[in-house]
Image (cartoon, rainbow, N blue to C red):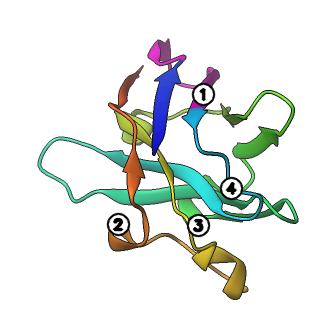
Amino acid sequence: QVKLMESGGGSVQAGGALRLSCETAGTVFNSNCMGWFRQAPGKEREGVAFIYTGRGRTYYTDSVKGRFTISQDKATNMVYLQMSSLQPEDSAVYYCVADEAGTCGYYNDYTGRVTDFVYWGQGTQVTVSS
């Protein structure tokens, strides 16, 4: 069993930055996929960024490339999402996710499928004002 706990959300003005943190408790997999989805009111859940923990390979949806960076600290079982140049359209609840199979590692490009992830955090709100 895996428990994911997000922190670091908040409110920021456009152009600002935030860092989200995701702490993993319980079973730790050597090579799996972890990452972040987000969901804005009235919109579908959207994959944002993912990391294949075995090799550190990263994946980003087009709208955040060059602005967001996902990283991991294996020693502390943490995954981070550094967000910069934030825009109002980045406002959403951000969810940390983890799988067991390492599915993202099979792809050159990967933007996340909700059904690929078994474990979800409770979500953290990010609000960007213009």
- Check if mark 2's residue and mark 1's residue have beta carbons within 8 Å: no
Which of discs 3 and 4 lies nearer the camera? The answer is 4
Image position of 105 (left or right of 128): right
Within the magenta stretch, is there residue 10? yes
Mark 3 or mark 1: whose residue is earlier in sequence: 1
Mark 3 or mark 4: whose residue is earlier in sequence: 4
Report which residue position mark 2 lands on. 114
Within the magenta stretch, is there residue 23? yes
Report which residue position mark 3 lands on. 62
- In the picture, the quarter occupied by the C terminus is top left
Mark 1: amino acid: Glu
Report which residue position mark 4 lands on. 29
Mark 4: amino acid: Phe
- Check if mark 4's residue and mark 2's residue have beta carbons within 8 Å: no
Which of discs 2 and 1 lies nearer the camera? The answer is 1
Image position of 99 (left or right of 107): left
Q: Mark 1, residues whose alpha carbon is within 10 Å: few (<14), some, or many (≥20)?
A: some
Please provide percent x and percent y for residue 124: 38, 25
Magenta-tinted stretch: 8-24
Q: Residue at x 50, y 15 (%)?
A: 13
Report which residue position mark 1 lands on. 23
Cα separation, mark 3 vs mark 1, equals 26 Å
- Check if mark 1's residue and mark 4's residue have beta carbons within 8 Å: no
Cα separation, mark 3 vs mark 4, equals 28 Å
Image position of 27 (left or right of 106): left
Mark 3: amino acid: Asp
In this view, the residue farthest toward the left is: 42
Please provide percent x and percent y for residue 109: 66, 82
Q: Residue at x 45, y 60 (%)?
A: 47
Which of discs 1 and 4 lies nearer the camera? The answer is 4
